[in-house]
Image: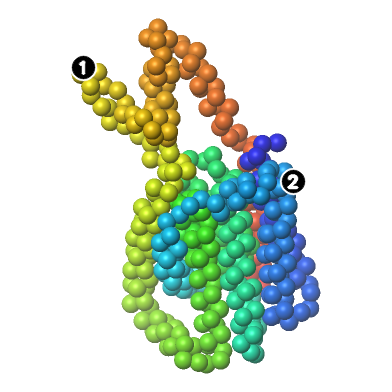
Amino acid sequence: MTKTFKLGGIFLITVVNLQIVRMIFYFIPLSDNLTGWLFSLIFQGLAMGLIPFLLYKAWVGNGKDYLKDFKLSQKINPLSCLLAVGIGFLVFYINIGASTVWYILLRSLGFTYPSNVGTIYSSPEVLIFELLATAVLPAIFEELIDRGLLLAVLENEKNDKKVVLIIGIMFGFLHQNIAQFGPAVFGGIVMAYMAVKCRNIVPGMIVHFMNNAILTILNYSTQVNNGLGRLYEAFQRFYSSNFLLTFATWAAAIWLIIVALRAFDVMNRKYRQKSDPLYEAEKPPRPVYTGEHATPPFRENTAGRAAFQDDYFFKIYGAPRGAKPAEATSPSPFKDTYTAAKKAAAVKWWEYGLLYCSILSAAVVTLFTFIWGLLR
């Protein structure tokens, strides 16, 4: 079994574990507070934390490899974390709009939302436990699996846009609840973009925590009717009666988040290049003219650039740089060896088989929740 296949297996086991734990807790008669806390502790810490880690050590590599594959070891620009806080506020605000639009869409299709008591904030201690269960644990363990592990599975996929889209949509499916699918996809795409651009999931953890923590604090404030709660209720009344104006602010927030994400990409580019020297070497470089001949640019002490020039030379001449003129012919044994090596390194379709099973499994459950809501 290849590494990609094994990582896909770990992801599939995690998805199935989520479904099993959800079914178990559905039939356990506990209070809403206790059920939510136990579910988060068991699923987040065990099913998304300990079990994947043990499977990784047994099938793939050691602890150091785990940090690298799950995107925890890559150095990033320190300002990325500060920018992630701002992006977290924007994601929360935009998700208010996304949730509203998604709610209207589902209701128009005849979907009935489930009724539940929700968290009862009988004391400040409940707020602390709720923040731990809904903000801290998901920010850590969901990012490890939904971004870190998925990026490891898709490591050989060079199309960043495709990777971001797959991970974003999969994040929606992993909630396995049609009511959460739309807003989750938006947040998933933002956090996937950040993880892809800096090769580290810590900024995404910050965004994830900010989004969930703000919602939890506002729910608490609304229940206890403090100043923040009254302000939030006033905002809800405002946007429900001035939807077009509020929609314009959501559009402005989307523009701001696009600008912020571009800045995030730029500030982390050099950090990514240090670990992936060929990151920006996608186009052939401009030739440097010396006398009558043009050669690809080459900086003596830049290993990544040198590696790219070797690759570039192969594609043009079918022989390694420095080869004799007679060797740069077609068919070339050098070029044949190079082509064979590239084909051998390419991921076969079946290596993604268990990932496809994971996507299908989560999508089927999400579809079932939609059908169940229509029949309710």
Left/right of residue 57 with respect to residue 270 in the rendered view? right
Determine which quarter of the picture holds residue 273.
top left
Up-down: is 158 above or below 263? above
Helix, strand, or loop for circle 1? loop
Left/right of residue 228 with respect to residue 176 in the rendered view? left
- Measuring 75% from the left and 61% from the top, which residue is drawn there? 20
Comparing 351 with 363, the one in front is: 351
- N-terminal-most mark, 1 or 2: 2
Q: Is residue 315 visible?
A: no
Determine which quarter of the picture holds residue 277.
top left
- The image position of residue 96, as x and y in percent, is 46, 73
Instruction: State the residue position of label 1.
Output: 292
Residue 168 numbered mark, or none = none
- Mark 1 residue crowding within 10 angstroms, few (<14) / some (14–19) / many (20+): few
The amino acid at mark 1 is: Glu
Q: How many marks?
A: 2
Instruction: State the residue position of label 2.
Output: 58
- The image position of residue 207, as x and y in percent, is 49, 66
Task: Point out the image quarter for the N terminus.
Answer: top right
- The image position of residue 201, as x and y in percent, is 53, 57
Helix, strand, or loop for circle 2? helix
- Measuring 34% from the left and 73% from the top, which residue is drawn there? 249
Up-down: is 120 above or below 277? below
- Mark 2 residue crowding within 10 angstroms, few (<14) / some (14–19) / many (20+): few
The amino acid at mark 2 is: Ala
